[in-house]
Image (tube, coloured by chain):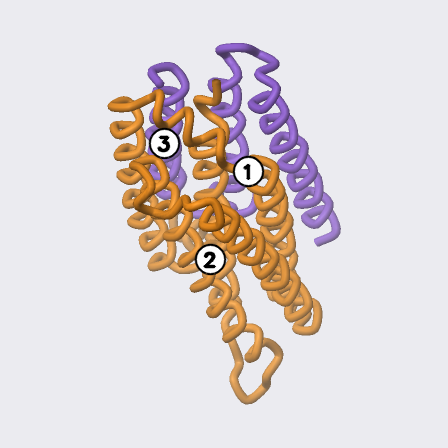
Chain colours: A orange, B purple
């Protein structure tokens, strides 16, 4: 495949791939901070980690993975010019994302009820920071998906397939972040 | 299109199974001290599957795949260090 042809067939635009890479680097640094803090006080981190609900975290992972599958369907439908299917798949993505948000809010509420807030200790400061930042990404993507969904199939506002691909790429990135945040906070280092 | 959908479904199934497996292994400490390493390895595998199969990073210039792989390697090393040092 020649370079020119390859560029023509890549999903999304150059801008979204760059944006995702920059965001990846930011989260990579946050993971490094988490490691360095954990090395300083492994006992506190292990003791705090046990207080997280791994089952809820796991269910949230399954929800996000399913939403990513639905997003693949939305992109496929957009490429096939099937506006109705694309809108349906995007609605499924946002429905699953809403379920993720609800579960996360329940988890935060559960922690607050027993007096565990962001200032409880360094583990929970990082827990709220990492999951909160991820949640902001997710809610931002939900807003974009809603906005794009309104215009899919609207002849008055024709949309490039690359717009759907861009939002799809970002959605998969949000999924990848959670794929690492969940085990690093909830599972790795359990004693 | 039909083949693409089938492939996406199979990837989704594999991702779901890997998630369940790593949670069970971590919670039950089935592999003892190696449980954490296994969980990190599974996370890296899942992320790579999404980058390749869902983000289609193999299409187009290879530079993006290399850059994303480099990030994946760095984040995986961080996880392995958490699993072994902490």
Rendered view: A121 above or below B5: above
Q: Secondary structure at mark 3?
A: helix
Residue drawn at x 37%, y 45% as measured from the top left = A130
**How many discs mark residues in the rendered view?**
3
- x and y, in percent, of residue B55 in the image: 51, 48
Rendered view: A90 above or below B39: below
Residue that protrudes farthest toward the bottom in the picture: A156
Q: Which mark is residue A138?
A: 2
Neighbor class of circle 1 (other Cα within 10 Å; few <14, some 14-19, many 20+) is: few
The answer to whether any part of residue B27 appears in the image is: yes
The answer for how far apart the CA atoms under marks 3 and 2 are is 20 Å
Does the CB distance between marks 1 and 3 fall below 8 Å?
no
Residue drawn at x 55%, y 38% as measured from the top left = A53
A75 sits to left or right of A13? right
Q: Which residue is mark 3?
A: B75
Q: Secondary structure at mark 2?
A: helix
B62 sits to left or right of B4? left
Q: Which residue is mark 1?
A: A53
The answer for how far apart the CA atoms under marks 1 and 3 are is 23 Å
């Amino acid at each position: 495949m020649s370079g020119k042809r390859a560029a023509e067939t890549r999903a999304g635009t150059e801008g979204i791939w760059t944006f995702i890479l920059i965001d990846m680097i930011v989260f990579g640094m946050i993971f490094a901070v988490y490691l360095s803090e954990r090395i300083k006080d492994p006992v506190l981190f292990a003791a705090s980690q046990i207080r997280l609900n791994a089952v809820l975290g796991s269910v949230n992972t399954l929800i996000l993975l399913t939403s990513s599958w639905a997003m693949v369907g939305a992109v496929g439908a957009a490429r096939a010019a099937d506006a109705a299917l694309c809108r349906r798949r995007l609605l499924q993505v946002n429905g699953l994302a809403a379920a993720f948000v609800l579960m996360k809010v329940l988890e935060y509420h559960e922690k607050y009820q027993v007096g565990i807030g962001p200032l409880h200790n360094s583990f929970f400061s990082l827990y709220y920071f990492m999951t909160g930042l991820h949640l902001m990404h997710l809610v931002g993507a939900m807003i974009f998906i809603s906005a794009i969904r309104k215009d899919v199939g609207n002849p008055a506002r024709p949309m490039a397939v690359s717009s759907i691909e861009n939002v799809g790429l970002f959605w998969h990135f949000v999924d990848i972040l959670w794929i690492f945040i969940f085990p690093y906070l909830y599972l790795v280092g359990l004693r | 299109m039909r083949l693409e959908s089938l492939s996406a479904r199979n990837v989704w199934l594999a991702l779901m199974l890997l998630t369940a497996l790593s949670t069970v292994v971590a919670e039950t400490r089935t592999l003892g001290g190696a449980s954490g390493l296994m969980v990190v390895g599974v996370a890296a595998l899942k992320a790579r599957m999404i980058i390749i199969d869902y983000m289609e990073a193999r299409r187009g210039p290879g530079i993006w795949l290399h850059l994303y792989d480099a990030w994946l390697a760095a984040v995986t090393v961080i996880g392995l260090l958490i699993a072994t040092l902490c």
